[in-house]
Each structure stands twice: as structure tokens, then as C-alpha cells.
Amino acid sequence: MSRRGLIAAIGGLVLLSPVAGSDAARLAAQEGTRSNQDASTYGCIVCHADMRRAFAQGAHAERGIRCHTCHGGDTSQVEVATAHRGRFLGAPSKQATTELCASCHSDPNQMRQYGLAADQLAEFRTSRHGELLLGRGNADAPTCTDCHEAHTIRPANDARSMVHPTNIPRTCGLCHDDAALMRKYGLSVDQLSRFMAGAHGKAIFEDRNFAAPTCIGCHGSHAALPPDVTEIDHVCGKCHVLLADALYAGPHGTPSLTRRIPGCLGCHTNHGTERLPPEQISELCVTCHAAESSMATLGQEIEEQVLHARGELELAAEAIARMVKTGRDVSDERFRYRAAYTAYQQLAKVQHSLDLEQLEDLGREVRSNAAVVRSTAEAYAEERWEHNLLLMPLWFLTLSGVAFAAFKLRELGRVSHG
């Protein structure tokens, strides 16, 4: 049998093989119509059908990359000894993997057409992971295939990809949730659980807001490093621009930039990033400031402003709900409520500046719009009461007529039976 016939026969076996599956079978059929060199790739699947099937589902297979592109060898052969001759790379080490991936991904001419950066390896060398792996030869650190998989490499916008926003926390957790591994480096293993319970985790997994940051949003991806104390405000400020501006405008701004206080982390934790409940504002202030100090008093006043505004907003929402139950059109009231809610949301920004005057102005805006909604609801309730009051005589006469008619019917019944 000729070599081409042998490869065709192998392709036929793949079509029948339950291990290879439909993906490998489809590719085998496609490969049979291509050049002898491409078709000879299927010499690999005599032993590695499962890897070929996994590879067929990834982005590299769509770009014409084949087994020998990364592994070398003679793919026209079906015997192990002859298939692995020449320049053959079986399972590369972690260090060799970075160089192998970079042979394409560090070439701007190859990456430009796909809109991909060509500096990943350079960034990786600057990261804590790269320093351990490439600088110290520490194989505990991840390489490319630990985060992107080895054969089924999917683009980041594919929900099945290890680097899709919904999967990144768990991908990082493969190592950072490993207690034995993290113990060697003095790192805790609660980052993932805290992130999932925090504001950013809830935004992604509950609200499906993929604009919220994952691990790489704060630490970087290939150049993964923990932010320095002086960098935290800038990292948070990439997304929370208005909050950062307010922080810098207030009394905490300069101390944050000069390392005297930990900036955002003075009030929020790093992975938890919890939203501070309004009723805990003054309590938080006294963790740094003396209970009788002017700053502690300011914290109490800010808390009162926010709580008062929130209470008014809740009462306005209840008023709208009561009117809706009676069938009244509440379009204008909803508009008023939205204005009040917008002002309430702005309180969160102004809190960071500790500007009590601005907080009072926003609080008044919340209260005035909420008051209009509540007064409308009260006036409507009074109108309904008056309307019902006017209907009482009519109901009385109607019931009296019904009672009189029933009485007469009973009398007629007695007469007819007498």
C-alpha cells in the first residue's frame, strides 16, 4: 500500500473510532483533500487521537497550525521511532513552553493580522510568575499552557476558555487555592472566596457585568504583579475615575499618594472590595481617628446624611408601590424617583471627598424629589378616601333596597303558603 493510501486508511479508522469522535473525523476528511504534507499530519493520530481531537476545537487549528508546527518530527510516519526522528519536541518543559509559544507570539508580523500583542513574553519576564520560572527555574510557577491549556486553546471571548472573564478567577485559583503550594510562599488561599463574595465578583457572576475586573484587572495577566501601596489608588481609579478624583480632592488624597495611608484599602479590602453599608461609616472612621476627634464627628455627620437620604428614597419607593396597586399612572412619580435615586448615587462619589457641604446639597435634592412623590401619594390617597366617603350613601341606599326587597319576598312567601 502506498503512503497516501496508508494515511487514507488511518483516516478511515479515525472515522470509526469512538475515541477520536466527530471533530477528528471531520478534520481527517478535510485533510484527505489537502496536500500530502498536510494529510500526513494524521500520522500523529495513530497514537494521539485524543490530543488531535482536543486541538481541533481550538483557535490554532482554525489558523492552519498542525501538530508538527509545535512538536516537529516526521508526521508522514506511523511508527514511533520514525515519526519522532529529527527535530522532535514531545512534552516541553515549562521554560521551553514559554519560548515555543513566543516563537510565534513575539513576532509582530505574525500577530498583527490577528490584532494580538507581541510582547507577552517580555511582560511575563517582568512578572512574579516569570521571575520564578525563568529567573530561578522554579517549576511551581505557571507557564503559558497552565492558563491557556496546551491543545484546546480558545479565544478569551469563548465562554469555555480558561481566560474568559467568568473563568479567570477559577483559573488563578488552580494554584492560589492550593494550600500546600501557597504555604511555601507565605500566601493565603482565601482570595478566590473573598473575590466571589465581594462587589466585583457579584458584578460578574450575578449581574453578568463583564466590565467588572477579574484578577487580571488589578494584577495584570502576563505581567502579573501585586500592586504596590502607592499604585493601589491608580489601579482602582482605572475604573472608578470619579471616585479617585473625589479621593484626591479630599483630605485623604495627599496622604494616599505619599504612602502615609493605604488609599482605597484604608476603607475597602483588596479582594473583597465590599461596598460599605451607610450605617457603618462612622464606625469605620474611628478605626483610624480618635472617637472625639473632628474627623470622627465628620464621619458621623456623613453617615447621618446618607442614612437620611436612603430613608427618604425608600419611603418614596413605597409610595409609588401603593399607587401602582390602585391602578394609578405613576409615570411622573417614577421620573421624580429616578432623579432622587441619581442624586443618592452621587453621594457615594462625594463621600470619598469628605465634602459635607456637597453631601448636604445632594441630600436636599434626594429629599425634595422624594417629598413630591410622597405628597402626591398622600393627596391621591385622600382623594380616594373622599370618593369612597361620597359613595357611602349610595351603598347604604342600595343595601337598604336589597334588604327591603328580601323582606317583601319573604312576606309574599308566607301569604302564598297560608
Image (tube, grey):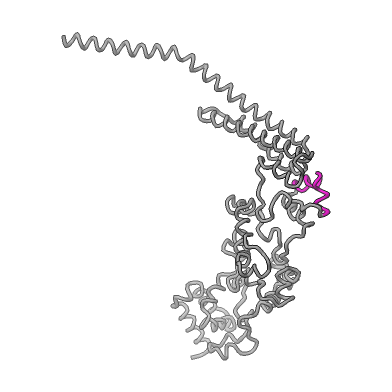
For residue 387, above or below residue 84: above
Is 255 included in the stretch rendered in magenta?
A: yes
Closest to the observer: 105 or 323? Answer: 323
Q: Quadrant of residue 44?
A: bottom right
Query: On the rendered structure, is 411 left or right of 30?
Result: left
Q: Which quadrant is the C terminus positioned in?
A: top left
Residue 347 at x, y percent in the picture: 71, 39
Closest to the observer: 16 or 415? Answer: 415
Q: Residue at x 43, y 78 (%)?
A: 16
For residue 193, above or below residue 249: below
Query: On the rendered structure, is 243 left or right of 139?
Result: right
* Residue 405 seen in render: yes
Residue 121 at x, y percent in the picture: 73, 72
* Residue 109 seen in render: no
Closest to the observer: 135 or 183? Answer: 183
The span picked out in magenta is 242-258
Q: Main secondary structure of the magenta part?
A: helix
Residue 194 at x, y percent in the picture: 62, 56
